[in-house]
Image (cartoon, grey):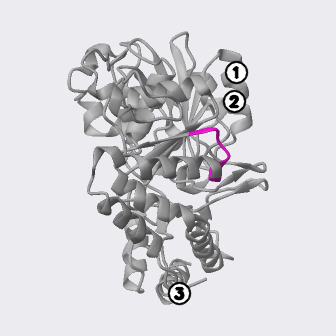
Amino acid sequence: MFPIDRIKENERKYVNEVLDDAFRTSCGYKMTRRLEEAFAEKFGSRYAVAFCNGTATLHIALEAAGVGMGDEVIVPPLTMSSTTFGVLHTGATPVFADVDPDTFLITAEAIERCITPRTRAIIAVSLYGLSPDMDPIMALAKKHDLTVIEDDAQCFLGKYKGKTVGTLGDMASFSFQASKHMTSGEGGMLITDSEELAAKIRQYSGLGYAGITPSKGKISKNDIQNPNYSRHVSLGWNYRMSDVASAVALGQLEHLDELVEARIACAKRFDEAISGTSLLARQKEGKEYVNSYWAYTVKLTDDCITWADFREKFIAFGGDSVYAEWKLTYLEPMFLDKVFLGREALLNDSVSYEKGICPVAEKLQGRLLQFKTNYYDADELEAAAQALEKTVAYFK
């Protein structure tokens, strides 16, 4: 397994193909089209649309679902804030549902408590590489006629009851940011099986152009050169992915299995490092789940030991880093001070943001330790695993 190269020859080859075309408009979007087709095939989806990043994907997914001012979207607070930013970008109101204390993921039970007549959509986050329990979430969404968007930025090739994560909701969003399983520095992808949603995704992310379709992201030269051509049939955003970024992402996709397997191998070694201790409780996984381990995340069970105490010892024993869980989104200064750049006037007054909204998530946030899994060298992984073993032994 180790060592492996995160960047292989094809990434460089495909970038050179784009550069050789010298960015002629007649050659534009060819690599992005190849990436979209390959990604859709890999994930078993009818349609895939590439984006400049994995926040734009969430915004456009909500726009495609018809979410807007006056609507509410249910989101988890225990995740990167971009999930919620996508809601704010539409002018809708984010509503935070609590998480499970063992899986750290949003649940159907918590979602149901948050549903109101204004609820239009749910964003279910596959945190750290593990899918939420999607069957009851989808059943609840069907009951209330809600759109479900999977935020799978941290979950590539994960499985839920035999199905590939990303094929469970109405749409699924992926990120190619630098820390993700596959990367192009920045970038993202939306996938769906719905032709109607795919058409809206393509149009809204491509400046509202008239000539693009679910499978076509570029208007023709004949259209552009026609003085009577009406280009824009709706408001849209310029969220398209560049061909250079697509070239890198395509190369990454071609060895995605290896990249994911490397992270799973890291997690297995960390499992060995914490075996036999009750000090740390790993993220709970169901038997029919496959975790792709964007991070190996555990919960400190001893309240007398702080996150900072554990991290300090881990580094002292030769570990390279431990990450904390992001501050809960609704406890970030922008929420507490309502710095929404004018969008605060669009939000529903009945929804408040303050401590106590999601008590389980609030208790977890300062107790979670995220260990990186993007080791591509056996010696580096072993040093981290041995540091973890020594840290656990120290606090026994």
Q: Residue furthest bottom?
A: 379
Looking at the rendering, the stretch of residues picked out in magenta corresponds to: 42-47
State the SS at label 1.
helix
Mark before the other along the chain sequence, 1 or 3: 1
| Quadrant of the image containing the N terminus | bottom right
Q: Which quadrant of the view contains residue 205?
A: top left
What residue lies at 41% left-to-right and 86% top-to-bottom?
318
Circle 1 packing at 10 Å, graded few (<14), some (14-19), many (20+), is few
Is 266 within the magenta? no
Is 2 drawn above or below residue 238 in the view shown? Answer: below
Q: Residue at x 70, y 56 (%)?
A: 285
Whole-number angstrom distance, CA of label 3 to CA of label 2: 40 Å
Query: As rendered, which of 221 and 91 lies closer to the eye?
Result: 221
Residue assigned mark 1: 142
User: What separation in Å lies between label 1 and label 3 (alpha carbons)?
Assistant: 46 Å
Q: Which residue is mark 2?
A: 138
Q: Which amino acid does the dot numbered 3 rest on?
A: Ala
**Which of marks 2 and 3 precedes in the sequence?**
2
Above-or-below relation of 21 to 308: above
Q: Amino acid at mark 1?
A: Lys
- Give coordinates of residue 145: x percent, y percent: 64, 16
Q: Residue at x 55, y 9 (%)?
A: 117
Query: Height in image: 136 above or below 99?
Result: above
Query: Is 96 displayed left or right of 143 in the figure?
Result: left
Residue at x 41% of width, y 54% of height? 246
Q: Is residue 302 visible?
A: no
Label 2 is placed on what type of residue?
Met
In the image, taking residue 91 as reference, residue 364 lies left or right, namely right
Q: Secondary structure at mark 3?
A: helix
In this rendering, does residue 265 appear at all? yes
